Image: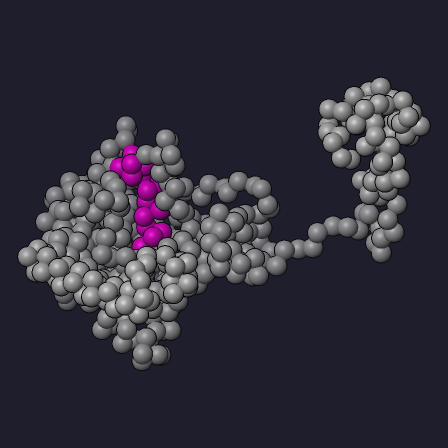
Amino acid sequence: MEKVGPKTAAKWLAQYGTLDNLIAHADEIGGAVGENLRKALDWLPQARRLLTVKCDVELPQAYAELTPPAPDIERLRGLYEQFGFKSWLRELALPEAGQQKPAPILTFPLKGKESRHPPLQGEGWGGDGGNQPAISSGHYECILTEAQLDAWLEKLFAAELVSLDTETTGLDVMDAQLVGISFSIEPHHAAYLPLAHRYPGAPDQLNREHALQRLKPWLESERYKKLGQNLKFDLHIFANHGITLAGIHDDTLLQSYVLESHRPHELGNLALRHLGLATMSYADVVGKGAKQICFDQVDLDTATRYAAEDADITLQLHQALAPQIEVQSGLLHVYRDIELPTMQVLYKMERNGVLLDCDLLRIQSRELGEKLLALEAKAFEAAGQPFNLNSPKQLRER
């Protein structure tokens, strides 16, 4: 109603009780607001009908039958991936909407035994064999003794391809220090070598420098093929400890980019998309915001589960992505002859910096400036007068 706000309306209702009673006493209200009220008398009944919730709508179904259908998981996953809804993607793995993700089951005798993570019943949560993503599981070992390291070195030197990943104190590649290394040579099996976990009560770990010296012949050899997810990062981390990582044969981040450059390439997203597996996220392990901790403060049970899973999932992803590239000669050429070599070039640029010829740049800047001035003069001549070349409005007018 014109010029009748909430305060006036509340005052009238307090005085007259109901809209019908207000209408009956409309002649008693003076001033401009009373006049506006009387002008709206014909409209008020219709306004009330429009604002009243209709409770007697005829429905083709009984109220009790109005229950939501089962969600279309595959369609939801596609939409979530398309629009980058990472949290909702993870929720697809939960038993019911709104429930917390259960902590992974760990049986972890630290002194050299395997950490075994029981597979889920069926193909997804709840054991119903549905299409929901399963929680990643595997047989993961924590390397804490010299004998374990000896056994894994033997495996590494004998393996045709090894999935490799590093855990660090941070993401600044020039400053981050190595906290641990994970390896996988077959799907669902992996190991984590902790080297610098420092939380109170942390188990004894192998000396980092000693372990790296044991690993160095394998790490620096072109003969032994390595696989990883964004190995440019790992190149930097090993370089921080005096090791030149060699033998890089495949990188799942680059494989993903070559196959689907428009999609996300983060490991957890790739695992959901190509393997149907929900993995632990970095935030799950270290937390967020003010409560976030450094990876060297993560307990070895959790660190082993997370780090070994990364190496394991990377190997599984490679086995899923590589065949798709190999059957397309064009993609194979881009991957082998462009992307992988470019990664090494970018690493060297990031590591060493780029030398600039400042004198040459000044000459080029002056030449470009002179050319721009000449082009500007031609534009003014063509327009018949000077104007602002940076103004779309003035350009339209000319």
Q: Quadrant of the N terminus?
A: top right
Q: As rendered, which of 69 and 18 lies closer to the eye?
A: 18
Left or right? Give the position of 351 relative to 8. left
Residue located 77% across and 50% down the image:
66
Q: As rendered, which of 133 and 27 lies closer to the eye?
A: 27
Residue 227's spot in the image, x, y percent? Answer: 26, 62
Task: Work out whether 345 lies above or below 282.
Answer: below
> Is 338 within the magenta?
no
Among all residues in the image, which is located at the extreme right?
A: 24
The secondary structure making up most of the magenta span is helix
Residue located 37% across and 31% down the image:
291
Residue 10's spot in the image, x, y percent? Answer: 77, 24
Q: Which residues are magenta?
A: 294-311
Left or right? Give the position of 16 relative to 82. right
Among all residues in the image, which is located at the extreme front?
A: 384
Left or right? Give the position of 257 relative to 156. right
Residue 172's spot in the image, x, y percent? Answer: 23, 44
Residue located 81% across and 24% down the image:
31
